Image (cartoon, rainbow, N blue to C red):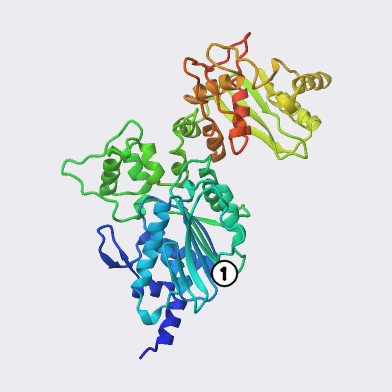
Amino acid sequence: MVTRKEAIQALKKDPVLFFNKQCYITNAAGKKIKLNLNPPQIMLQNMIDKQLKEKGKVRISILKARKQGFSTFISIRGLHKACYNKNVNVKTMAHLHSSTIAIFQQMKYTYNNINDDLKPKDTANNLKKLFFGSINSGLDITTAGSGETGRGETFHFFHGSEVAFWQNAAKHGTGIINALPDVEGTECYLESTACGMVGDGEFFYNKVMNGLDDNTDDDFETLFIPWFASPEYITETPPDFALMTHSDWCEKEYKATYNLTDEQIYWMRKKIQSSAYKKYGDFCIEYPANPIEAFEGSGEDSFIEPSIVSQARKRDSDVDGGEIALGIDVGGDKHSSDRSVICLRVKNAFKIIWEQKGIERDELIQVIAGFVEQYNPHRIRIDITGIGYNIDKSLIKLCNMRNIAISDCQGVDFGSGASDSNRFVNQRAEMYHHLRETLLIGSCDDSAMIQKELTSLRKKPQVTGLTRVQLMPKKDLTESPDRADAMALCCHQSKRQFIGLIC
């Protein structure tokens, strides 16, 4: 016969036993059911076990599809942590007040259905807090807002839900990480569907990408769960079912790539045809098959649409007999974190061939001269806005001294008047317009950072009656698009020479 003390010790030691024996939840129909871990939840549990064994703590970013049960699983794991450990502070934060309340109500429902002999008695139980005075542990909730979560607090378990949609995500993220002691037994989960690469979604994007990179110093690892890991995402096919090719996706190719069944493809087709998901890209945001497409699918208000960049990244470079151009975006000196970037354009193919932070002006000029000698470009365009002032003239002088052939080298001030002043407010808008046109048929580096920078640009709303194109200023971006600027410089328009698509 197992004693009460032995039963509590067993539950404390084994969260999965707690899930299987003591945890009840309500399903979509509002019925009380036992918590049985589904395949995505089991994948997360396996990653938790691995991290605890190797590191003694848990730090996981979860990029997910919709309705895979992660919020329920993590919140109940937090409940377990608070119920069976002394002096533990469990915090939950979601993007909306209604979501935060829903998660907390599920935790309280599970707590209320635990055998009374196997749980601590609550001494505070309200809309935002559940506290157990006998062990000085508890759970509370908050909603992402304008403040900084974590200031003056210490968390031992943190659950961030729909992190990509948090208001002031970067500020909250910094506060949370500072509030987590770097000690054994602490756990932090940041889970979300994707919400683009810029704006408030940028914090989660960076966490996911860092967690996929073995060379990063970030403590967080990324768990990506594709939509087809959920066995319920299937629909019975009709007798006349056949794979189709749509305007923006091919079912046969998709099925082969991810080894799917007809029932999964038919479920996906019906989902895309629904009122919520009219396009393949819309579907990929909330039901991704791989991490990159989850973020690439968003950003439809970008000046250069994500789909254009995605296709350019996949194209083979067509460079036979093409004209050569160099675009140089000038960053700061050794005291600056700003990046200098050189882009090579051959015909309609763009490639970033060099970049460095904090390089001195004279050293940068020598680097550029080396590439001029190597590629003998037909055109050179250099950013002379601010710190790059007159660097084009210095480059010409150095090349002449070294007998390096140099032709059509011009400095470009991004804010100066456009060649086509009837259509564009300034050179910046004009260059990016022609970069967009070129990428429709051209190619670029297959890089998530290129995707992020190019799609971060937004068109500035115009006063009624004005039709000229203008982009939102750089100060409104969280990060300077240095690589994108170097690419745009390769598309500079000159009054004496119009450079559009190179055929």
Left or right: 59 as drawn, with respect to 127: right
The amino acid type of the residue labelled 1 equals Gly
Choose between 359 and 132: the one closer to the eye.
Answer: 132
User: Hey, which residue is sitting farthest bottom in the picture?
Assistant: 1
Choose between 272 and 428: the one closer to the eye.
Answer: 428
Which quadrant would residue 385 be assigned to in this image?
Answer: top right
Left or right: 188 as drawn, with respect to 329: left
Q: How many numbered circles are shown? A: 1
Which quadrant would residue 355 be assigned to in this image?
Answer: top right
What residue is at 61 percent from the left and 19 percent from the top? 427
Residue topped by disc 1: 56
Rendering coords of residue 169 (x, y %): 54, 48
User: Hey, which residue is sitting farthest left in the picture?
Assistant: 239
What residue is at 54 percent from the left and 11 percent from the top? 422
Rendering coords of residue 375 (x, y %): 68, 24
Choose between 4 and 99: the one closer to the eye.
Answer: 99
What residue is at 51 percent from the left and 58 percent from the top? 60
**Judging from the image, what secondary structure is the residue with disc 1 in?**
loop
Where is the N terminus found, in terms of image quarters? Answer: bottom left
Residue 428 seen anywhere in this rendered image of the structure: yes
Rendering coords of residue 207 (x, y %): 55, 50
Choose between 22 and 345: the one closer to the eye.
Answer: 22
Rendering coords of residue 377 (x, y %): 67, 20
Q: Residues within 10 Å of mark 1 (few under 14, many from 20)?
A: some
User: Hey, which residue is sitting farthest top in the picture?
Assistant: 496
Residue 481 seen anywhere in this rendered image of the structure: no
